[in-house]
Every structure is written in C-alpha cells, then in structure tokens.
Image (cartoon, helix red, strand yellow):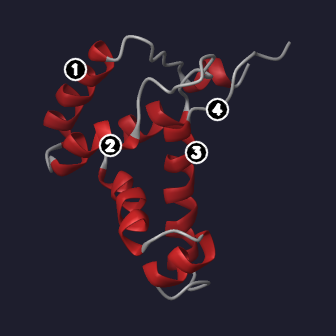
Amino acid sequence: MTRAGRLPRIARLMARAIRFDQLLRIRTVKGYADLAHLGRVSRARITQIMNLLNLAPDIQESLLFLEPVRSWRDALHERALREVVEEISWERQRKIFAGLLSRHSGVERKSAAESER
C-alpha cells in the first residue's frame, strides 16, 4: 500500500547534505563551489544545506523519516531549522527542535522501524 503525498523538502535536503558530504570525503568534488556549480545553486545555499549536518544525529534521522506532505506547503522548512543548527549543544538543539515541531503542528514524524514496514 503506497501513501499519498510527497517527500518533505527538508527530508530531501537532509539526504542531499549527507550525499554531498560523501562526495567531499571521497574527493569526487573539491569543495562547496563544485557542489554549487553541479547543483546550479549558490555556494551560500550549499552552506545552508551542509549546515544540516551539524544537527544532532537523532534530529537528522527525524528529518529523514518525516511523514509525507499532503498539502502544497511543507510545515517544516530549512529556514525554520537555522535556529536549531546555530546551537552547538545537541541537548539544546533537541529542545529547540521539539518546540519547532509543536509550533508546526502539521509535522508528523515516524520512527525508523515504522518506515521499514
């Protein structure tokens, strides 16, 4: 049974950040400028995407496993997460993220176990 809806944009951005990091580590690309050129975005945008890697691992996982979006607009977006990314303490990140989720009531998370079903 397939679920209606689309993958949340923030989930796609998180996955891209992980993939971009892999490309940098194995030296497929030299730096953010190469990624920006390949993705046809600015270096600043690549930095915003790559900053998602500074999130606590459990927050990254939560983003990857968000429920599909069924409306035209995503409830949670990268700009809203900048406040979380700026915080260096994972414990404080979790508190800020929890507050974001409660403010953006349309955001539904699923566990990794649920997504494997």
Residue holding disc 4? 7
Q: Secondary structure at mark 1?
A: helix
User: Amino acid type of disc 1?
Assistant: Gly
Seen from the viewer's position, the closer of residues 111 and 101 is 101
User: Amino acid type of disc 2?
Assistant: Arg
CA separation, marks 1 and 3? 22 Å
Labelled pair 1, 3 in contact (Cβ < 8 Å): no
Q: Secondary structure at mark 2?
A: helix
Q: Position of residue 106 (x, y in %)?
A: 45, 13
Badge 4: few (under 14), some or many (20 or more) residues near its Cα, within 10 Å? some
Query: Quadrant of the rendered structure where residue 58 is?
Result: top left
Q: Position of residue 48 (x, y in %)?
A: 36, 59
CA separation, marks 2 and 4? 17 Å
Q: Position of residue 72 (x, y in %)?
A: 59, 23
> Relative to residue 25, is residue 86 depicted above or below?
above
Badge 1: few (under 14), some or many (20 or more) residues near its Cα, within 10 Å? few
Labelled pair 2, 1 in contact (Cβ < 8 Å): no
Seen from the viewer's position, the closer of residues 50 and 27 is 50
Query: Split into 4 quadrants, where in the image is the C terminus?
Result: top right
First of labels 2, 4 by sequence position? 4
Residue holding disc 1? 99
Mark identifier at residue 79: 2
> Relative to residue 75, is residue 35 depicted above or below?
below
CA separation, marks 2 and 1? 15 Å
First of labels 1, 3 by sequence position? 3
First of labels 4, 1 by sequence position? 4
Labelled pair 3, 4 in contact (Cβ < 8 Å): yes
Q: Secondary structure at mark 3?
A: helix
